[in-house]
Image (cartoon, helix red, strand yellow):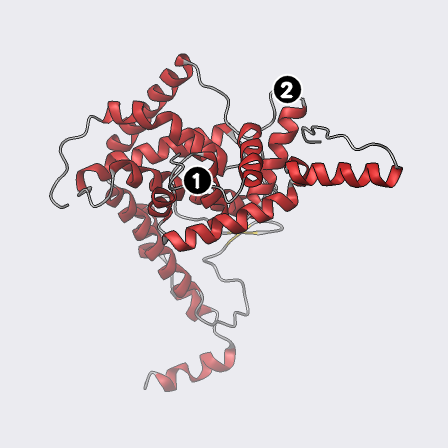
Amino acid sequence: MSGPVAEVDFDAFVGEHRDKAISLAWRLLGGDRAAAEDVAQESFVRANRGLGSFRGEAKLSTWFYRIVVNEAHRYRRRSWFEGLLGGDVTEDLAAPECEGPDVLLRGRIAQALLALPRGQREAFVLVHLEGFTVREAAAISGRAEGTLKSHLHRALRALRERLADLDPSHADQASRGAHQAQGTPHSVRETSGS
Amino acid sequence: MSEQEHDPSNERDAAFVERVSRGYGPPARSDAERAAFDARLRERLEQHSSAGSWVGRLVPALVVAAVASMLFLVRSEPTAPTEPAPAVVASTQTTKLVLPSSPAEALMALADDDSEGIAESLPDDYAAIESLLLGS
């Protein structure tokens, strides 16, 4: 497919992709709402500039979400350097609006994701959290499908180690083991994270 | 998500992913928040278009970088002063270096650079043979 793309209604484009762009950036940036909006806005600005030269080699949405992923990475790298120059180097998660187990769980998942290498984090977020197909995620992240599947497998394994209490089979085994040690009847209990 | 293209290897994976997805998602956005986002985006687009192209922003930055490099090279020529170089602005305790705030100022500073201060600071033995080197 080549040649100029038909004129795009940019307002409609924003309306169609706004929520998903913010959600994707939010998940890539550890739940920082302000950062996610900043990244989404910058992505739309870049898309607005680049639409004129977009030749339709890929789906417009794939092209746009690749901008979002790259912009999120750029934001994290910039924050890291700024931290070296004088701020706190640790990841600055958004302050929770209220305390509670949900916010704490969100923080744990965010930290676990941010601890993953970039490729694994992006693969997991794109496929498992944002619902892109493996083919779409591979195109967005600029990787081969085989590589993406490998990243997915490793990400899942690493996250299950860090978030073992969210793994239903792990909770079940732990409970069974504890009851066997105590000599009490086994019963399955649901855990909702620490 | 298509089950044909994305199929967790087993139910355990699916259950774990479901828990992570439920526990880690952005808060829902209201129509007012969406409108506010769109308004900020419009402002940003207007700022970008009024500031000119990225080339227009890059050129002055390159000029300043080039001039700063030239100033650094000029001031790093080896000297062995016996008295303070007059080009340096000295305060009671520290030495102040005044940086140009614009390309035009940087160019003017280069033009105003007093290189005679270097010759005045030559040690006596070099000054003594200066006339021989100049062939007088």
Label 1, label 2: how far apart the Cα atoms are: 29 Å
Q: Nearer the viewer, residue B95 or B84?
A: B95
Mark 1 or 2 closer to N-term?
2
Q: Position of residue A22 (x, y in %)?
A: 42, 29
Q: Position of residue A178 (x, y in %)?
A: 82, 38
Q: How many marks?
A: 2
Q: Is residue B108 left or right of residue A176?
A: left
Residue at 37% over, 51% down: A145
Q: Position of residue B107 (x, y in %)?
A: 31, 52
Label 1: chain letter: A
Q: Is residue A114 above or below residue B88?
A: above
Residue A127 is marked as: 1
Q: In this view of the protein, can residue A117 be seen by the observer?
A: no
Q: Which residue is mark 2?
A: A98
Label 2: chain letter: A
Q: Nearer the viewer, mark 1 or mark 2?
A: 1
Q: Nearer the viewer, residue A150 or B41?
A: A150
Q: Are marks 1 and 2 on the same chain?
A: yes
